[in-house]
Image (cartoon, rainbow, N blue to C red):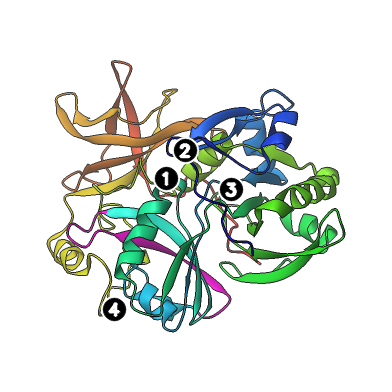
Amino acid sequence: MAADPSPSPAGETLRSPLHDRHEALGAKFSDFGGWSMPLDYSGGAGGVVAEHTAVRERVGLFDVSHLGKALVTGPGAAEFVNATLSNDLGRIGPGQAQYTLCCDEATGGIVDDLIVYLRDETHVLLVPNAANTAEVVRRLEEAAPEGVRVRDHHRGYAVLALQGPRSDEVLEAVGLPAGHDYMSFVEAGFADERGEEVGVVLCRTGYTGERGYELICDADAAGALWDALMAAGAEHGIAACGLGARDTLRTEMGYPLHGQDISLDVTPNEARLGWAVGWKKEAFWGREVLLAEREQGAARRLTALVSTGRAIPRPHMGVSLTADVPVGEVTSGTFSPTLKKGIALALVSRSVDPEAELGVDVRGRREVFTQTKPPFVDTSVREG
């Protein structure tokens, strides 16, 4: 894959290589980690609810090229990554991907959550969040032993997410492989508009809770790939989807968003992400402080809330046990197009009974919410 272009000037808003296609489809844009990305396509036939429904029922195509891309290469690259990031790469093998966390060594707070693609012991691809890519790369560069190279390819690659129950059929229609196991990836060739073959990495991952794939290719090949997928998906009711629908879809799954549900001020224990930590590993950033917190018990926990009425929760709304006993704060909140109810993720005190009803301060009114376990909706993401 191609090397990254020269870094952008400080403060410049970056654009996806697909920006012109989004404009043609009537996209409304918003800033995501310094990138101007489609929020929704309400200027056309879309809109968040329509795009959300397309993914749950048919298939949707997202441009998520704002996500970071970094390569760690050289002898011992995988061993180095395993000694720094939280999850245990020993649990997977070449051709598999893994959700993991970059934690702060001193506090255990979450610097970022990311996906690791393990090609082999000498080649690891990392996909962090847009706003955190430079910091994750900086920390890895500073810690890398001699012979291990960490390179930022944030602008050199594009990432498309094809999500929904008809995603396999769309991939097969353009000659790309489908049907591999959840959290596994394959590398394949795709013919661009000039008939030249370009490499594509296809991983059965996503952020929607539906069966789907994330495709990584050189930025200059993204247009041809987008066009082919949209054309092949037409008979399946494909929709171009913006990051607004991606947010409602991930919230219905209870997937955390960095900068809201998780951050440097939130630990994996508080976020209930202990499953993404290799507790038996000898080393990873934040290990000692996180083990101590795990033993003692985290002060807060991320919990899922469902409205008993018509209230729509939003981030930073207060959560209370009774009218005068605050116990936490909403971190993510939205209207669920699937449930037709307000849903939320909230950080609440560990002292709160998991069965207790909680109040959320919605515009000055205390609205009642019940606690539940995510996901909020049924998922088939791992099937097949």
Question: Closer to the observer: label 4 or label 2?
Answer: 2
Residue 331 picture location, percent across and down: 34, 37
Vertical side of 42 occupied by 177: above or below:
below
Give the Cα distance between marks 4 and 1: 28 Å
Vertical side of 336 occupied by 169: above or below:
below
Secondary structure, mark 4, is: loop
**Is tag 3's residue or tag 2's residue first in the polypeptide sequence?**
2
Residue found at the far top of this picture: 364
Label placed on residue 65 = 3
Q: Which residue is mark 2?
A: 34
Q: Which residue is mark 1?
A: 131
Specify start and end residues of the magenta stretch as a single range.
Answer: 93-109
Using residue 277 as the reference point, say whether residue 63 is left or right of it.
Answer: right
Give the Cα distance between marks 1 and 3: 12 Å
Q: Residues within 10 Å of mark 3 (few under 14, many from 20)?
A: many
Give the Cα distance between marks 4 and 3: 32 Å
Q: Which residue is mark 4?
A: 281
Q: Quadrant of residue 360?
A: top left
Q: Is residue 98 magenta?
A: yes
